[in-house]
Image: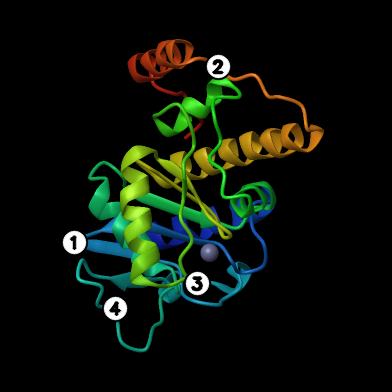
Amino acid sequence: MNRQELSQKIIDTCLEMTRLGLNQGTAGNVSVRYKDGMLITPTGMPYHLMKPENIVYVDGKGKYEENKLPSSEWQFHLAVYQARPEANAVVHNHSINCAGLSILEKPIPAIHYMVAVGGTDHIPCVPYATFGTHELASYVGEGIKESKAILLSHHGLIACGENLDKALWLAQEVEVLASWYLKLLSTGLEIPLLSKEQMNVVLGKFHTYGLRIEE
Ligand SMILES: [Zn+2]
């Protein structure tokens, strides 16, 4: 896909994220790997007003086009591409359940076999740092090596993938896991977890067969 097509796909993904109920206001942002850097949504613009020419190119050193301002979270998007060579798309949002769980500073443990979607036996939660900072980007760069989806303490979710469809699908799956986990926590009951062995079987199957999603 050329820049125009990729930019349109970014906008379509933002609109789909809203349709799925994963966005809160203009809080979410989306990017794709492009040349030695990325194309990313601009700061503070409602998705329904966004045009492909508003999407911003940020190079691998963090330099961006004049007269354009990328999302304030551009540093952690770039950190994901640097940490995961196979990732070509990043989705970030403040979805209700992921952000809610992030306030408890809790990873999602193996409550259900689908926690394996991130590539490990839990969905990690990285420490808090102020939005838009290098410090937060460095936490993200470390955390995302462990899992393709991570919670950011007192903030929200990041999910990456080989393309935008896969990254958005992953964000949706983790939102479901987060909603289950929050409900379970609120019961005050002890929550049974799948064992390391049980999760290793699932991780092996996911690795062998992959995950089929609609493209
Ligand atoms: Zn955010």
User: How many residues crowd around disc 2 within 10 Å: few (fewer than 14), some, or many (20 or more)?
Assistant: some
Image-quadrant location for residue 176: top right
The label shown at residue 194 is 2
Q: Earlier in the sequence, mark 1 or mark 2?
A: 1
Asked whether the beta carbons under mark 3 and mark 4 sit within 8 Å of each other, the answer is no
SS class, disc 3: loop
Residue 1 visible: no
User: What amino acid is at disc 2?
Assistant: Leu
Alpha carbons under labels 3 and 1: distance apart: 23 Å
User: How many residues crowd around disc 3 within 10 Å: few (fewer than 14), some, or many (20 or more)?
Assistant: some
Residue at the disc numbered 4 = 64
SS class, disc 1: loop
| Residue 9 on image: x %, y % | 45, 55
The label shown at residue 51 is 3
Which of discs 1 and 2 lies nearer the camera? The answer is 2
SS class, disc 4: loop
Q: Residue at x 45, y 68 (%)?
A: 41
Residue at the disc numbered 1 = 36
CB of mark 2 near ligand 1 (< 8 Å)? no
Alpha carbons under labels 1 and 2: distance apart: 40 Å
Which of discs 2 and 3 lies nearer the camera? The answer is 2
* In the image, farthest residue toward the right: 187
Alpha carbons under labels 2 and 4: distance apart: 45 Å
26 relative to 22, above or below: below
| Residue 146 on image: x %, y % | 34, 38
Q: Earlier in the sequence, mark 1 or mark 4?
A: 1
Q: Residue at x 44, y 24 (%)?
A: 211
Which of discs 3 and 1 lies nearer the camera? The answer is 1
Q: Earlier in the sequence, mark 2 or mark 4?
A: 4
Foreground: 29 or 181?
181
